[in-house]
Image (cartoon, rainbow, N blue to C red):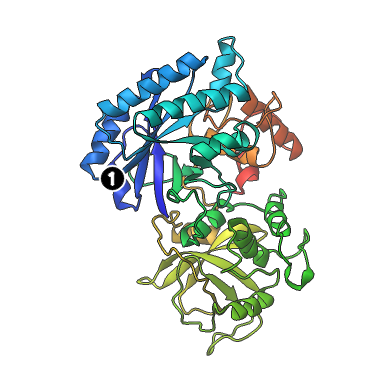
Amino acid sequence: MKKGIDVSYHQGTIDFSKVKKCGIDFVILRSSYRKATDTRFFEYVKKCKTEKLPIKGVYHFIYALSETQALAEAQYCISQVKKAGLGKDIYIFADFEYDTVAKAKQAGVTLGKTECNKFTEIFCNYAKSQGYKTGIYTNIDYYKNWYSKSLFAKYPVWLADYDGGPDFACIMQQFTSSGQVAGIVGRVDMNYWYGESTGNVKVRSRQAVVDLICSWEGLNEADGSYKKIVDIYNSYTGTFPRGVKMKYGWAWCACTWSATAIKLGYTDIMPIEIGCEELINQAKKMGCWVEADNYVPNIGDAVLYDWNDNGVGDCTGYADHIGTIIEVNKSQGYFIVMEGNYKDSVRRRKLAINGRYIRGFITPKYTDDTISYVPPTKTETTVKSERSGYMFNPEVVKSGSKGTSVLLVQEILKSRGFKGSDGKDLSLDREAGPNTIYAIKQYQKSRGLTADGICGTNTWKDLIAI
């Protein structure tokens, strides 16, 4: 499994040398939309070639209003790929989504499932006829509710799925729109490449565990968002250890580790349980328990604690707590852990290697040990103060605001079920329009805050527990 990014002119000037050095394996570029070229496309192609950073493919955003226009857009896309000097070893992805439908409606044209499938098929058929590998970019909604399965049987899928591993077979998964990569200012889409096996290979990746547990950072009991983790555990379709499901209100640190395994489908290598001591028993049965305080862990391992440890000799007491290791700094003698139910939230903790309280480690037998990106580590000060972990200072968001802070508000509100005034999920467009402001007001009302539609200091504190 390889990790990559997809970029367009929105990312601005990119230092692809830094991108490559930080462990990015490939790039997907937006080539075009309608019959227009992305303003950074040729620049990005040239810079990627200079840095010998593989271009895995390009995508074209379809805005066609008819079948004739869909074919014309495909022809235009291919012409720009040729002009850029890209070979036929790349993928060309068709991208038909919400904005396609919205812009058509503004033009007085109604597009539905029929057009979605037909326009995409016309596009892919043409790309294939010109000798290119081609596929379909789609999110979960369009996969389930718009596209026909017969079309997916014909062309491979690039799936946008931001919660754990891919829910459907795909050759590539866009797993976040909020990645941070050296050489790029702001957030960027990030992807896993599974290969042309369409995602059916049984990959067990340390990186995927880190990405998932870090995506839960900030979930907490105060606003009920931690229930998402409990719900994932209870969704398990196998036999529950000891026949017990999780309940809201119970200690949920072990549940967090277990929910990670369940969401990713890694229960064959990661033991699951809702009790820490029972997790140790399960890990022993699976042959992945290390009974040694001085073990130097790897990213993706779990560490268990005994808070009654006196610090003398090897700790063999009763396990009280568990966390997932997301960073190891052997030279400086510490590692960083992400834990559920740490002060009623998902938070980070910094621990000394061979330090006090360490009961032992769970060491799953991953098939992919590659770690190409680790979320930025907090400084010593921020580890102690237990801030939320967002790597920038959120700005006030009000009507007309644009940028990363708006995107963060939209992502949080969408994940918690707050919709726009149109009754639909918020668009992650980085612009504080009427729907975003409406959702902010609804959130403020639900939390007893001043419902002014402005996400200032008090609302930010409530949203992400700064």
Q: Kindly identify the amino acid type of the residue bearing the numbered disc 1.
A: Leu
Residue beneath the point at 60% across and 62% down: 261
Q: Is residue 361 above or below residue 437?
A: below
Residue drawn 40% across and 43% down? 5
Q: Nearer the viewer, residue 80 or 121?
A: 121
Residue depicted at 43% across the width and 54% down the height: 376
- Residue 307 seen: no
Q: Position of residue 25 (x, y in %)?
A: 34, 50
> Is residue 168 at all visible to an observer of this figure?
yes
Residue lying furthest top in this view? 108
| Residue 19 % position (x, y) | 32, 46
Q: Residue 103 in the image: x percent, y percent?
A: 54, 17
Outermost residue, left side: 50
Q: Observer-nearest residue: 289 or 193?
A: 193
Q: Depth check: 321 or 23 in front? A: 23
SS at circle 1: loop
The image quarter in which residue 232 lies:
bottom right
Residue under label 1: 53
In the rendered image, residue 263, in percent from the top left (x then y), is placed at 62, 56
Residue at 53% from the left image edge and 22% from the top image edge: 100
Q: Is residue 172 or residue 242 the one in the foreground?
A: 172
Q: On the image, which quarter does residue 307 sit in?
A: bottom right
- Is the N terminus in the top left, top right, bottom left or bottom right quadrant? bottom left
Mark 1 burial class by Cα count in 10 Å: few <14, some 14-19, many 20+: some
